[in-house]
Image (spheres, rainbow, N blue to C red):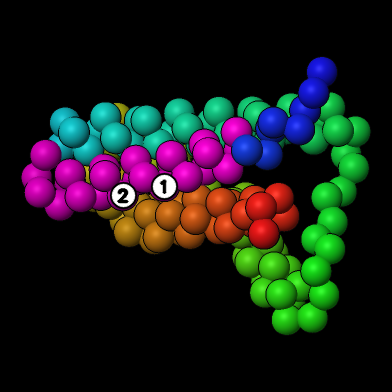
């Protein structure tokens, strides 16, 4: 199986999640909770598919590490983005599940309390996931 397509799929799913997060945020700010729900569910699905593809890719790749070949300032920037992305990406799934559970149960006070900090973190993870891809495979 040719696994070389996985990084592009992963970056696309990360980018799509970010787009739907933003659209969901805009919808709720305009008071359209039905559209907000649709966009946020789509963002969650994109992120879940990303996670499944990411884990599949690394399983099939046999855990081989992808190295960033540039040196100097670009390497420092890449590592700073990658480290912050990785740490924050580990926080998103449990926090997103918790936020969804509160929303489904109608506990919007707790839902909002979580999503006020989750939204910028999740957006950051989505954007930096695409940046990591671009730095590794495009530029």
The picture places residue 49, in percent across and down from the top left corner, at 55, 28
Residue 82 appears left or right of 131: right
- Residue 87, visible in the rendered structure: no
The picture places residue 120, in percent across and down from the top left corner, at 40, 60
Q: CA distance from mark 2 to mark 1?
A: 6 Å
Q: For the residue labelled by badge 1, is the local secondary structure a helix, a strand or a loop? A: helix
Q: Residue furthest front?
A: 139
Q: Give the main secondary structure of the magenta stretch.
A: helix
Residue range highlighted in magenta? 9-32
Asked if residue 22 lies in the magenta stretch, the reply is yes
Q: Check residue 18 in the rendering and tell me which mark sits there, or answer none.
A: 1
Asked if residue 16 lies in the magenta stretch, the reply is yes
Residue sitting at x 67%, y 59%? 139
Residue sitting at x 9%, y 45%? 31
Assess whether mark 1 and mark 2 are in contact (beta carbons under 8 angstroms). yes
Callout 1 crowding tier (Cα within 10 Å): few <14, some 14–19, many ≥20: many
Residue sitting at x 87%, y 48%? 65
Name the residue tied to disc 2.
22
The picture places residue 89, in percent across and down from the top left corner, at 59, 51
Please count the marks in the image: 2
Q: For the residue labelled by badge 2, is the local secondary structure a helix, a strand or a loop? A: helix
Q: Residue furthest left?
A: 31
Which sits in the foreground, 26 or 33? 26
Residue sitting at x 67%, y 74%? 77
Q: Check residue 96 in the rendering and tell me which mark sits there, or answer none.
A: none
- Location of residue 43 with respect to 136 vertically, above or below: above
**Quadrant of the image containing the N terminus:** top right
Residue 64 appears left or right of 5: right
Q: Quadrant of residue 34?
A: top left
- Location of residue 124 with respect to 104 vertically, above or below: below
């Amino acid at each position: 199986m040719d696994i070389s397509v996985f990084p592009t799929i992963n970056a696309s799913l990360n980018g799509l999640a970010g787009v739907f997060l933003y659209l969901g945020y805009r919808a709720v700010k305009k008071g359209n909770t039905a559209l907000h729900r649709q966009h946020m569910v789509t963002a969650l699905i994109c992120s879940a598919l990303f996670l499944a593809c990411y884990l599949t890719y690394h399983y099939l790749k046999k855990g081989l590490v992808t190295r960033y070949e540039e040196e100097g300032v670009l390497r420092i920037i890449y590592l700073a983005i990658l480290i912050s992305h990785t740490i924050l990406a580990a926080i998103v799934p449990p926090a997103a599940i918790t936020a969804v559970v509160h929303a489904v149960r109608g506990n919007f006070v707790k839902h909002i309390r979580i999503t006020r900090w989750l939204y910028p973190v999740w957006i950051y993870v989505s954007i930096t996931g695409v940046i990591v891809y671009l730095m590794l495979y495009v530029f």
